[in-house]
Amino acid sequence: MTIAVYGAGGIGCYVGGRLVAGGADVVLVGRQRVADEVAEHGLHLTDYRGADLRVTDVRFETIPAAAAEADLVLVTVKSAATDTAAAELAEVLEPGTVVVSFQNGIRNGDLLRERLPEQLVLTGMVPFNVLTKGGGAFHQGTEGGLDVQQHAAIAPYVEVFERAGLPLTQHADILPVQWAKLLLNLNNPVNALSDLPLRDQLSQRAYRRCLAAAQTETLELLALQGIKPAQLMALPPHRIPTVLRLPDLLFRRVAAKMLAIDPHARSSLWEDLQAGRRTEIDYLNGEVVRLAESLGRAAPVNSRLVALIRQAQAGPRRAWTGEQLYRELRP
């Protein structure tokens, strides 16, 4: 079985590299810049538990045709590039090829399914954070395996992912899992605007209150829509905002696991801002704004976070204190 990772950036290189290290036949497809980096350095994959893997025998291609031979295609492009990736894959994939969207946001699997009617498209979710360190080094800073929509076509690959240290958890209904992940990802703009590592940012109550406000607003809208997010953590989603608002000392006692994060981990949105790339804010907090509009409601907290990230993209950027940001979101 051949696996193609289409859009091999941070997540794609990490997942693809772990699969190669586990003995899978993998081709990474991505940009020339990343291909050159991998050709020079190979892949150096580490995680918060102490894993330290060096993978030198990596096949990295830069043209869509490289995915044509794959039995399984993992799509890991940024959300804004999904339409382009779908058009490219439609030209080269055989009918019946299994395609899994491992992307942020809610709608990418549906878009791929619409554009690839002859392939079997499933929705997946990557719950963990990957930090791109440069020189072919990628670091998993938070816990988790991989989540995917349940289907018999996944069965041949379960052992492959298990060997790679990325076990697949299958879900009959993936949408509540996606929304549960998005609730956590609402912290991405807060982290990016703070310009701090995730653990340092989450250690400060003022920043946590910003995240709690964004989550509370989202949970109210999801309830109106009749969607109950899945429980991905020890706490159910509706309890998390209350815990986030606790004073720092009490938070460290009650929710120590939330701070069990690699000290270097940051959000992918922070990485995009630093690199001058287009962020995925429209597919994170922007999804909440779209949900509110569909319900005839407003989402002022998430709307303001979207606006602040767009301002940061345009430059110049500033590092917000927790108090400054909370006042901005809740005047």
Image (spheres, grey):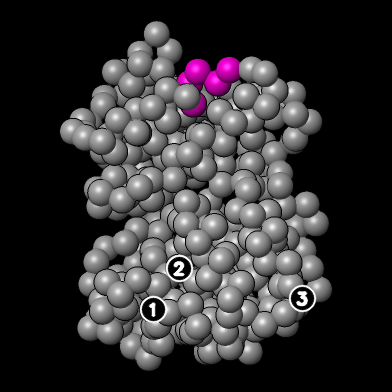
Q: Reading the chain from its start, which is encountered first: label 2 or label 1?
A: 2
Can residue 276 be spotted in the picture?
yes
The type of residue carrying mark 1 is Thr
On residue 62, the disc is 1
Which mark's residue is nearer the viewer, 1 or 3? 1
SS for callout 2: loop
How dense is the environment of label 3, judged by Cα within 10 Å: few (below 14), some, or many (20 and up)? Answer: some
Identify the residue shown where x is 37% and y is 91%.
Answer: 57
Q: Reading the chain from its start, which is encountered first: label 1 or label 3?
A: 1
On the image, which quarter does residue 183 sit in?
top right
Q: Which residue is mark 3?
A: 153
Q: Position of residue 123 (x, y in %)?
A: 67, 59
Q: Which residue is mark 2?
A: 7
Magenta stretch in the rendered image: 298-302
SS for callout 1: loop
The type of residue carrying mark 2 is Gly
Identify the residue shown where x is 57% and y is 36%.
Answer: 287
Q: Position of residue 228 (x, y in %)?
A: 74, 36
Separation (CA) of disc 2 from disc 1: 9 Å
The answer to whether mark 1 and mark 3 are in CB contact below 8 A is no
How dense is the environment of label 2, judged by Cα within 10 Å: few (below 14), some, or many (20 and up)? Answer: many
Identify the residue shown where x is 39% and y is 8%.
Answer: 331
Q: Reading the chain from its start, which is encountered first: label 2 or label 3?
A: 2
